[in-house]
Image (spheres, rainbow, N blue to C red):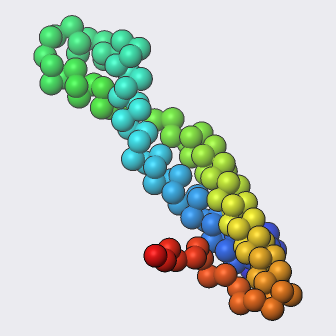
Amino acid sequence: MYLVVFPNRESAVGSLTGVLASTVSILVAHPIEAVKVRLQSGERGGLIAASGCRWRQAASLLRRPYCGIGPHLVQYSALNFIRFGTYAAAKSYFEGRRAAAAAEAGAPPCAGPLPLTD
């Protein structure tokens, strides 16, 4: 199935990993951002703020923490889908070129950096 959209399995896994990473980060960070923006904008909850109770003010800041999360999910999921998928595709392409060049030269393909010796 991944061959329809992606050149190889690594780029498909990379793209889906990007979507998963952005979704988790938005689900964790969005309520914190919502409280921060409400504090900076001076929103205190109308009549509840007039009562002077700090607990009620804090509760009014925490209402509807996921309001407006849809556009953020779409934006960052699409961005990371492309970013992670492109990175994985480019990485596998260049690793394939490196292995082909090593095979032409008769050397074994490089498995990583050379170890340091004394």
**Residue at horizontal 63%, vertical 66%?**
14
Is 42 or 60 nearer to us in this picture?
A: 42
Residue 60, percent from left and from top: 27, 25
Give the answer, above or below, for where 99 lies relative to 45: below
Residue at (46% x, 49% y) in the render: 25
Q: Residue at x 53, y 60 (%)?
A: 20
Q: Quadrant of residue 86 in the image?
A: bottom right
The answer to whether residue 70 of the structure is visible from this angle is yes
Q: Relative to the observer, which residue lies in front, 14 or 47?
A: 14
- Say whether residue 13 is left or right of residue 40: right
Identify the image quadrant of the N terminus. bottom right
Residue 29 vertical placement versus 16 (above, below): above
Q: Position of residue 8 (x, y in %)?
A: 75, 77
Question: Is 7 placed above or below 73 here?
Answer: below
Q: Which residue is nearer to you in this view: 40 or 109?
A: 109
Vertical position of residue 64 compared to residue 21: above or below: above
* Residue at 63% from the left image edge and 53% from the top image edge: 80
Of all residues, the one furthest to the right in this rendering is 104
Name the spot of residue 48 as percent of width and height, x first: 23, 15
Residue 51: which quarter of the image? Answer: top left
